[in-house]
Image: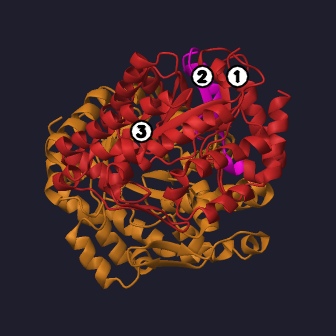
Chain colours: A red, B orange
Amino acid sequence: MAKRLLRSLTGEAVWPPPVWLMRQAGRYLPEYRDVRARAGGFIELCTTPALAEEVTLQPLRRFGFDAAILFSDILLLPWALGQDLRYGDGEGPVLAPIRDAAGLAALRSEGVPGALAAVMETLRRLRSSVGDVALIGFAGGPFTVACYMVEGCGAREWSAARLLAWRDPPLFSALLELLTEQTIYYLLAQIEAGAEAVMLFDSCAGLAAPSMFRAYVAAPSARIIAALRARHPEVPVIGFPRRAGCLVGEFVAATGVDGIGLDTSWDPAMAAATLPRRVAIQGNLDPLALVAGGAVLQRETEAILAAMRGRPFIFNLGHGIVPETPLEHVAALMARLRAA
Amino acid sequence: MAKRLLRSLTGEAVWPPPVWLMRQAGRYLPEYRDVRARAGGFIELCTTPALAEEVTLQPLRRFGFDAAILFSDILLLPWALGQDLRYGDGEGPVLAPIRDAAGLAALRSEGVPGALAAVMETLRRLRSSVGDVALIGFAGGPFTVACYMVEGCGAREWSAARLLAWRDPPLFSALLELLTEQTIYYLLAQIEAGAEAVMLFDSCAGLAAPSMFRAYVAAPSARIIAALRARHPEVPVIGFPRRAGCLVGEFVAATGVDGIGLDTSWDPAMAAATLPRRVAIQGNLDPLALVAGGAVLQRETEAILAAMRGRPFIFNLGHGIVPETPLEHVAALMARLRAA
């Protein structure tokens, strides 16, 4: 019998719905903070299989989620391509920004398999340790990864990246092309190391105007998904073009994703009414409603469940869980979902 | 004969379309930078009628837009309510954040008319100086103003504000109630001082989950619009629930706005196909496409024009014009629009 989350991703209305939470292995867990403190840097944590395996499994032990998601970061790919990457303390990542052809030319694909070998080892370990929950691999969507690579850090409007995309389409397209190819390589390797489903995190998608979205979010995602399917038709793909609003329907049609992550702004009832029934919807509780707990958490959860009942669905947040989330609120959410 | 922009807002498919640009009076203009440097602080600029009038008119002289929008700021209302407000150099506004009942209780409505009297004087001057272009007044949407008041500064996720909204609905509702009432007062006063249309800027709307959006974005906007209509049915209202994605249709229905501002992420063709024809669509060129200019500007402009032809429409950006915008790109855009 297939794992619950994978059944949802093949179009079955599994109920109670499978559940996992974006960034479920993270700073809200004291056991994560312990490992993180011992690991040295964040990249070390991601590339030390025993540690990455351990933090991936921690939230499952505590809450019994239906999926383990590889502990890693979308910026491991630019790092593997040779871009300088640092994680400050609570400051978010800082990269040496790429703004011209010389910066692009300095990236090196040859080093990628070696740099990411540890990630594959983590997945191989996890595949035997996760038991009956699904193992999800992931990568950043090429557009979002490119935004970080050009901007050099997280940004509110991502103006440097988007302006480069408008001003120098050949350069930006070449960067996207490289990232698309490498993401195909990376996700195929993850699947071959044990990932049973993969997710593309495109957090910056909503900043792209429609033509930019089509060229740099939807088209590369479609290429990646087609390439994965050609080799591994049995492995479902979840897309997450965050904040793409009304372009989400077009994204689903253009890419053929098996699952679609929705951010907090989507009305679950409208999503259920407008997105094709073959696609599993994944989302979309406000992470801050989980921090608030109590009546708010209950009401927001019920609204999602009511809208999603009877269709393929995976309960999740609309964005990553935040460090200040009380553990007992996660436990209360899980109790409610298991009784759905 | 009514002014072109006002005709669009009463449902007429005026063509070539009327045009103005969000933040058209701003740092991309050398003549604005001159006045700004002489004005002392930013609040002084907003509250000195001769200066505010001058910067409002500057972009009209240069580009001949179809509307003048009062030069002011959405945070003038919290400032008039007594909240401490400072504008650092290029840093954005900083307010003394309100996080509890004592902070709310310290706000004082009595001072509002006096503090904002200068704004009304600016509008009275403008009404005689704008000539045949429309004069737009504005306020922040209560949700966005509340987000700034709670957060204390601009933020990427507005977590403090949204968490307060979930955690303490009575406090957040009381703040929204105060802002809704004061916004009604403020916009009525603007109309009586000469504003021929008003706009509600709700830049944070897209961060609200659907239930929060309904309670704190759509409902207060509906109340404000009903109150304005009761006294001034001839004055159209433009809503701008930025990044609200698929909730925009619901916002239009719930509030009865005459015009709806769309952010960059909306596909113009989908907007034209799904939003009611009685509503004038306003938007939504990517401000960075205007910075880029050339073929990109041309292509993006044509896509909007093609989708909007034959329906009530006001050409604008999807977000404010940015300081690095070349003046000649604005001139090229205007030349194209006048020949539409």
Task: Tell me, yes or no, whether the highlighted magenta stretch contains residue A272.
Answer: yes
Asked if the residue under mark 2 is in contact with the one under mark 1, i.e. CB atoms within 8 Å, the reply is no
Badge 2 local density, few (<14 within 10 Å), some, or many (20+)? many
Asked if the residue under mark 1 is in contact with the one under mark 3, i.e. CB atoms within 8 Å, the reply is no
Badge 3 local density, few (<14 within 10 Å), some, or many (20+)? many
Magenta-colored span: A265-289
Horizontal placement of A53 versus B25: left or right?
right
Quick one: quadrant of the N terminus of chain A? Answer: top right
Answer with mark 3 or mark 1, whichever residue precedes in sequence.
Answer: 1
Answer with mark 2 or mark 3, whichever residue precedes in sequence.
Answer: 3
Q: Nearer the viewer, mark 1 or mark 2?
A: 1
Q: Which residue is mark 2?
A: A280
Q: Eyeballing the image, is B172 above or below B297?
A: below
Q: Eyeballing the image, is A199 above or below B45?
A: above
Answer with mark 1 or mark 2, whichever residue precedes in sequence.
Answer: 1
Regarding residue B145, the answer to whether it shows in the image is: yes
Circle 2 SS class: strand
Q: Which residue is mark 1?
A: A4
Horizontal placement of B11 versus B213: left or right?
left
Badge 1 local density, few (<14 within 10 Å), some, or many (20+)? many
Distance Cα–Cα, label 2 vs label 3: 19 Å
**Which residue is painted at 73% across and 56% down in the image?**
A31
Asked if the residue under mark 3 is in contact with the one under mark 2, i.e. CB atoms within 8 Å, the reply is no
Task: Tell me, yes or no, whether the highlighted magenta stretch contains residue B161.
Answer: no
Horizontal placement of B58 versus B227: left or right?
left
Subunit that carries the residue with mark 1: A
Circle 3 SS class: loop
Amino acid type at circle 1 is: Arg
Per the rendering, the mark at residue A141 is 3
